[in-house]
Image (cartoon, rainbow, N blue to C red):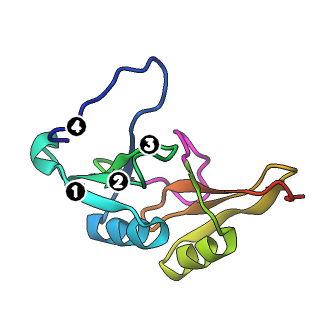
Amino acid sequence: MQGQIWEVIMGKVVHFEVHVDDMERAKKFYGEVFGWTFEDWSEYAGMPYFGATTGDADAMGINGALVKRMGPPPQPGQPVNGFSCSMGVEDYDATEAKIISLGGTVALPKYALPGMAWQGYYIDTEGNVFGVHQPDENAK
């Protein structure tokens, strides 16, 4: 956060937080699946908080953070009760293989958004739901 300037954009999502039980496990999961890098912002936040850089600053998307969960985690089978973020990927199937190999599970299997993309949802190592989105005009 140091040296970072936030432009005020009304209504546009500019940051996200993933609530986690095990910070090192979550950093490994998101770092290895999506290539995110992390910076310790705990001093600024006053709690365990790691800024997440999710990709090239010139590419579409936003950065966020992993934050230590301060309450009970979502229960298995519970519907999503907050925002669900989808990560753009180039190879859906390879990404799914990484997710599964690193302890994630399928929440909603891959399906076509006809003429647009492949989409699916997963549960990370911390019990959070997230999406995977691969643009593909041939999806059907």
The magenta span reads: 73-85
Relative depth, front residue between 4 and 33: 4
Q: Position of residue 140 (x, y in %)?
A: 90, 58
Residue 103 coordinates in the image, percent (x, y): 49, 77
Secondary structure under badge 3?
A: loop
Task: Name the residue beneath numbered marker 4.
Answer: 4
Say what amino acid the circle numbered 3 marks.
Ile
Q: Split into 4 quadrants, where in the image is the N terminus?
A: top left
For this orientation, the residue located farthest to the front is 58
- Mark before the other along the chain sequence, 4 or 1: 4
Question: Callout 3: 10 Å neighbours few (<14), some, many (20+)?
Answer: some
From the viewer's side, name the closer residue of 77 and 22. 22
Query: Could you tell me how far apart the alpha carbons at marks 4 and 3 are, in whole angstroms?
Result: 13 Å
Whether residue 110 sits left or right of residue 22 in the image: it is right
Secondary structure beneath disc 4? loop
* Residue at 41% over, 70% down: 29
Q: Which mark is residue 92?
A: none
Sequence-wise first label, 1 or 2: 1
Distance between the alpha carbons at the discs numbered 1 and 3: 15 Å
Q: Position of residue 138 (x, y in %)?
A: 87, 59
Q: Nearer the viewer, residue 61 or 16?
A: 61
Residue receiving disc 2: 53
Q: Quadrant of residue 25?
A: bottom left
67 is higher (above) or lower (below) than 101:
above
Label 1 CA crowd tier, 10 Å (few <14, some 14–19, many 20+): few
Q: Which residue is mark 1?
A: 39
Residue at 68% x, 74% y is 93
Element on which disc 1 rests? strand
Residue holding disc 3: 62
- Camera-nearest residue between 21 and 71: 21
Amino acid bearing label 1: Glu
